[in-house]
Each structure stands twice: as structure tokens, then as C-alpha cells.
Image (cartoon, grey):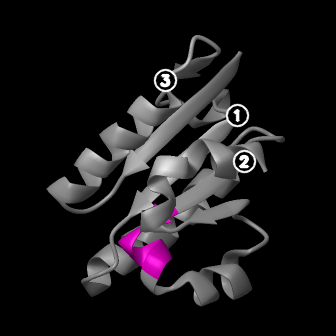
Amino acid sequence: MKVVGIISLGCCKNLTDSENILGVLKNPNIIFSNKLKECDLIIINTCGFIDSSKQEALDTINECYSKKKDNAKILVCGCFAQRYKEILESDYGHKIDAIVQIKEYKNIKNVLEK
């Protein structure tokens, strides 16, 4: 059994995308939780269009990294991840296990399997 948590930041579109991701991941072997310490996977769906949203995305990555259980993985997606992928890889690569581009959402299971 895997425990997955998702944090949706930003606009209503991100909330809809997060719900779609949860739908794609729906599986009898997956349960969802909002408690970081329980999660095997934390998905952070980011917004990246205004400065406060950018900072919120970075703060959330840091918070999840510091509060996650030892072997938990962090996946970052959304607009911030799309626009600033190189920065995330260079400055936060040690905290992030995967970055998923918006166009990859429908194949997110394949990304998770890697």
C-alpha cells in the first residue's frame, strides 16, 4: 500500500489539474493523505505567475522536504515547475525526485514508475 499526498497551490486550474492527477492515480493500492509524515509520495502542484506564488512554491518544497518521512519522494508539477525547471533541477534537485511537465500529467503513472 502506498500513501500519496498532494498540495495544490495557486489558481482554480491547478486545483482541477490536481484532482485529475488524483483520478489518474486512483488505485486500490494507493491511499491519499494530507499528513506529510505518512506519505510515500508528495506531489506539489505549483503556480509560477506572480512573485508570491513563486516563493510559496519554493517554501512548500522546503517544508515538504524537511517534514517528509525518510524514504518519501517529492514530485513537483504545475506552472512553476514548467517555467523554472532548470532552476529547480540545479537549486532543488537534491530535494526533488521528479519534475513533471504539464503535458505529462496524463502519463504521470509512467513517471512515477521510473
Residue 51, above or below 77: below
Label 1, label 2: how many angstroms apart (C-alpha)? 6 Å
Q: Can you tell which of label 3 and label 1 is closer to the viewer?
A: 3
Q: Amino acid at mark 2?
A: Lys
Q: Residue furthest right?
A: 71
Q: Earlier in the sequence, mark 2 or mark 3?
A: 3
> Depth check: 55 or 73 in front?
73
Label 3, label 1: how many angstroms apart (C-alpha)? 15 Å
Residue 57, above or below 69: below
Q: Can you tell which of label 2 and label 3 is closer to the viewer?
A: 3
Q: Position of residue 110 (x, y in %)?
A: 66, 47
Most common SS among magenta residues: helix
Q: Are marks 2 and 3 in contact (CB under 8 Å)?
A: no
Label 2, label 3: how many angstroms apart (C-alpha)? 18 Å
Q: Amino acid at mark 1?
A: Asp
Task: Report whether 34 appears left or right of 89.
Answer: left
Q: Secondary structure at mark 2?
A: strand
Q: Is residue 1 visible?
A: yes
Q: Amino acid at mark 3?
A: Lys
Question: Which disc, if any, is residue 40?
Answer: 1
What residue lies at 46% left-to-right and 77% top-to-bottom? 82
What residue lies at 42% left-to-right and 47% top-to-bottom? 7
Residue interval drawn in magenta: 77-82
